[in-house]
Image: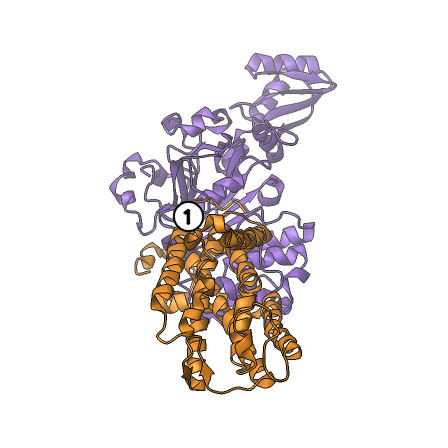
Amino acid sequence: MTDVRAVPPGPAGAPGAATETGAPADATAGPAASSPAASGPAASGPAASGPAASGPAASGPAASGPAASGPAATGHALAVSTSGLTKRFRGGQVAVDHIDLAVPRGAVYGFLGPNGSGKTTTIRMLLGLAFPTSGRAQLLGVPMPEGTVRVLPHVGSLIEGPAFYPFLNGRDNLARCDAADRTADPRTAADRINGALDRVGLLAAAGKRYRNYSLGMKQRLAIAAGLLTPRQLIILDEPTNGLDPQGTREVRALIREIAADGITVFVSSHLLAEVEQVCSHVGVMRTGRLVFQGPLEELRRTGAARIRVQTADPAAAAAVLGRLGLPDPQIAGDEVTALLGDFSPERICAELVHAGVGVRGLGVAAPSLEDLFVGLTGEGFDVDG
Amino acid sequence: MAEAPAIESPAAGAGPAAARRAVGPVRAWLRFFRSELRQVFARRRNLLLLAVVALFPILIGVGLRLASHPHGGGGGGGLSFVTELTGNGIFLSFIALTILLTLVMPVVVAVIAGDSIAGEAGYGTLRYLLAVPAGRTRLLAVKYGVIVVFALAVTFVVTGVALATGAALFPIGPVTLLSGTTVPLAEGIGRLVLVSLYVTAAMASLGAIGLAISTLTEHAIGAIAALAIFVVASEVADQVPQFAVIQPYLPTHWWNSFDSLLRVPIDSGTLAKGLLSFAVYLVIFGSFAWARFTTADVTS
């Protein structure tokens, strides 16, 4: 990785604070960056780095180089980074196609995409479970899968749903995981296991067999396994899958708590709505490609806002908007809309009034995140096969 | 890992370092090994298997006792050791081993070995163990260690129960070995222990084959069945005279050679060949399991 700079770790949950990744690989070029630009680091120009959030810290490209080259660099700016990461299955199907992830430390990174878009395969490669066909991946600055034994003790994970021995109870299942961890101290095991169970609210059910757990409890036990030892990064693959709204809320609250401790959270989901409230950054996958990556705010900004004018004289209003140079004016009943661009709504209002057009209502509407997300990933099931 | 702290970052704020690494690598290995061992020996299915295995020597002993003439002479047809049994109960152990080695013991070992990796894959726990990270080589080694301990347990359950049953149903005393020499009972039992260790080695080599098969699938039952079929095929081939040339290389060929230990002097040449055969199978299939398991994608 050469595209890494010494950005101080940002406070958890603060969207984009200081950690805005101006890294070239970052698909900050917006929606236009769809596939080609997102896959080639060189493609997205310097203009890409987003406004506001990208402070001075993020603008010095010179910082890439020696500081970042040590595999175990302390305070490595990125918790997860990949370059050209690709997985081609034996059948020839490309599940993950040259993706360049950049997850800043301290971020809550929503890894979004429809089912089958390559999210789980990516996570399996990040965790050393699957080997990439080409490209590189780093966790906490350590190359994977070579660094598996070194770095994974600092990474908690939930991978494609919970899985434990059905004939053991929750506590024994966690004890088994802990015993497998060669860095875990056996003397504190009992306390840590209880602590993790308590944290996910399973302490009362710890003695119950796993097979008798509800789906939500199973999910929480898996998260507890990820919290057995202090972590720097938590990777959660579809943590809300199959949960009822109540369970989904609990998981979200848990993610917030984890992030509040300064732990980077990488959470995948096929539902934007489930994670948008907790995410500071998002990456959007579509058929194996990363079609957007950046702070959530930036995704929001990519939605082009339209000015909406309600008036008794739509034709005159449309003429004013057209004269101002607003693109794509449209009339629908007593409402006129046009792309807002860089104009301020106040000025448009003044112009309308000045032109003698009676304005009943005026507003700015931006597409919802959901709309943007669907625009990026396509609609319906099994998009793009 | 000594290098682990290198990636500890103040940013983590993740709390006390107390949870980390106060133990040496050896103790960490032992802890994992003990945990897996407890896993296997606390599992009801496996205990049931051991109980069934323990039942066989009792049934065999009772059967032979009922069939035997009150004035000596065996009722076991061509089965070796049966004529000696009526004179000395210790021979029930050798009879039980001979009978159970054909199928019962290999199948029980196959259950544990076939389940070792495939079972974890089937439950999905394999991905979590590897993400801990247990370490692929370390996990494989620990799994194999557990198989060996289980093979040892199966063997000693058979010989132990058979010895107790034999002592209860038949006279017991100084042992007349196959070479005609008579040794004190204590030495006879000593030889029985050596026989059990030899059989354990045979089962351990079978376990390595099972481990290798187990890395190929996520269906434990498939791995278990494959290994059982493998054993039967080898035993059948071992009985067909036309296959005489390859018979010494069959994995099951030397299993019953433990009778070499019941001679004076001990037939060490045969034993050495048997142990060599076990070692070769262990190395070949152990290497295969390692090569496969450390390079394959875990997709379960």
Which residue lies most toward the left here? A66
Instruction: Report which quarter residue B271 is drawn in.
Output: bottom left
Q: Residue at x 64, y 65 (%)?
A: A209
**Relative image position of residue B171 (x, y in whole percent):** 55, 86
Q: Please give the name of the residue rendered at 59% of the width and 85% of the height, measured from the top-left corner.
A: B168
User: Closer to the camera, B163 or A210?
Assistant: B163
In the figure, B16 relative to B162: above or below?
Answer: above
For label 1, the SS is: loop
Tag 1: residue type?
Arg
In the foreground, B234 or B9: B234
Measured as percent of width and height from the top left, residue A47 is found at: 39, 27
Question: Which chain is painted in purple?
Answer: A
Which part of the image, by quadrant, shows the N terminus of chain B? Answer: bottom left
Q: Residue A291 in the image: x percent, y percent?
A: 50, 30
Where does the image place residue B10, in percent across and percent down from the top left?
36, 57
Chain letter behind tag 1: A
Residue pointed to by mark 1: A105
Q: In terms of image quadrants, where is residue A167?
A: bottom right
Q: In the image, B121: left or right of B134?
A: right
Q: Nearer the viewer, residue B149 or B36?
A: B149
Q: Which chain is orange?
A: B
Q: Residue at x 46, y 47 (%)?
A: A129
Residue B32 appears in the rendering: no
Is A221 placed above or below A127 here? below
**Residue B71 in the image: above or below residue A80:** below
Q: Is residue B55 visible?
A: yes
Question: Vertically, is A168 above or below A311?
Answer: below
Q: How many marks?
A: 1
- Left or right: A306 as drawn, with respect to B5: right
* A93 horizontally vs B275: left or right: right
Q: Are there few (<14), some (14-19), or many (20+) residues within 10 Å of tag 1?
A: many
The chosen color scheme is by chain
